Image (cartoon, rainbow, N blue to C red):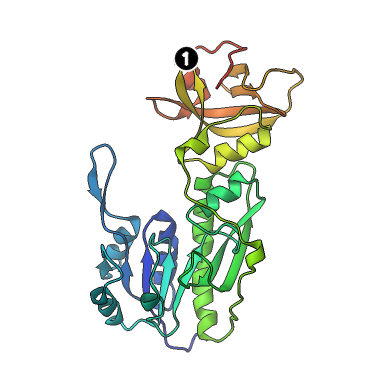
Amino acid sequence: MTNQKPLRIVFMGTPEFAVSSLQALLDSRHEVVAVVTQPDRPRGRGRKLTAPPIKDLALKAGLPVLQPTAIKTAEFREELAGYQADVFAVTAYGRILPGPLLNLPAMGTINVHGSLLPKYRGAAPVQWAILNGETEAGVTIMQMNEGLDTGDILLPGAIPIAADDTAATMAVKLAELGGRLLVEALDKLQGGELKAQPQDESLATEAPPLTKEQGQIDWFEPALAISCRIRGLDPWPSAYTVLNGKRLRLFKPEIVSHPDTNEPGTICKADKNGLLIATGLEYLLIKEVQLEGSKRMAVGPFLQGHKLEPTIRLG
C-alpha cells in the first residue's frame, strides 16, 4: 500500500474539531492540495473579524485556502475541479454539499462524523451522546451523499465516555480519533480494503442543534440525569439554575450519596469542596460555578464573595 501514489486531497472543515483531521492528513503520505473553510466571522465582544481555526493551520502549512460564500455555483465547482483531487475529505465544514461537488473527485467525498452512525446524525452528536447518558461515543468515517449524515459507513471507531467527561473533553478525544481514522480509511480505500456498509435506518437517531433553553436544570430529576445535562452542555450553552434571581451556571458535577433527605434543589452544604445539592435521586456536588455577569470559577473563591446558607433552594 505504501508504494501507491499519494492521494490528492481537498480538505473541507472549519472549527477546532476539524484541526486534528487536517493535521493528520498533513502528517500522512497523502497530499493536501487545498483547504475549503467558512468565511472569517466577527467574534467576541469587540466583534473582531476572526479566521476559522482550520484557516490558521492551512496558512501555516502554505496551502491555498478557499472561503466561498456560495458553494453551489458553477464557478466554485470549476475552481475545485482545477485541483484535480482524488478525494474530498470533510470534517465539520458546516454546510451541506450539493451532489455535483460530492461526486466531483474519482473517489467521491468522505466525512469524519463525531458519532457511531446511524446514531446521532446532525450538528451536535458529541453533546447529545453525553446528554443521553451514553457510556461510549465515537467517530464514523462515511461516504457522503446529499442526506444529513446518511451515507454509507466506511470505518467506525469508539471510545468510552468517562464519568467526568464533558462535551469539550470528548470533542478533543474524538477529534484526535477522527484524524487517525481518516488517514486509515484513505489508505484502506486506496488499497481496496474497505467495503461501504449502508446504515441501518431503524437505528437512526438525531442530534439537532442545542438551544440555551435546554440548559435549565430540573432539580427533581435524578442526579445522574442532571450530571449528564451539565457535562453535555459544557462549555455551551451550559446548564444553569437560579440563585437569588440571577442565573447560576454549574460545572464539574459529582454524584454523591448523602444520609439526609432534602427538597430537590436545596443547598445542603457549601464549602471549598463545592455545593452539595439535593436532587430527585441522590445528591450532586458542584465544583465550579459562574454567576450571571461574572467569570467561571471554583466554588471556594466564589463563596468568598457570596455567602450561601444551608437550606437555600435553587431554581
Looking at this rendering, what residue extends furthest in the right direction? 259
Where residue 154 appears, as percent x and y from the top left, is 57, 74
Q: Quadrant of the C terminus?
A: top right
Q: Quick check: 200 above or below 210? A: below
Q: Quick check: 48 above or below 222? A: below
Residue lying at 62% horizontally and 57% vertically, measured from the top left = 159
Neighbourhood count class around disc 1 (C-alpha, 10 Å): few under 14, some 14–19, many 20 upward: few
Left or right: residue 151 versus residue 80 is right
Determine which quarter of the picture holds residue 153.
bottom right
Where residue 58 appears, as percent x and y from the top left, is 31, 65
Where residue 239 appears, as percent x and y from the top left, is 52, 34
Closest to the observer, 238 or 51: 238
Q: Quick check: 297 above or below 131? A: above
**Total marks in image:** 1
Where residue 60 appears, as percent x and y from the top left, is 28, 63
Left or right: residue 224 versus residue 31 is right
Determine which quarter of the picture holds residue 92.
bottom left
Residue lying at 50% horizontally and 70% vertically, measured from the top left = 182
Left or right: residue 52 versus residue 5 is left
Q: What residue type is labelled 1?
A: His
Q: Which residue is identified by label 1?
A: 306
Closest to the observer, 173 or 313: 313
Closest to the observer, 44 or 132: 132
Asked which secondary structure carries label 1, the reply is loop
Residue lying at 37% horizontally and 67% vertically, measured from the top left = 12
Left or right: residue 271 versus residue 73 is right
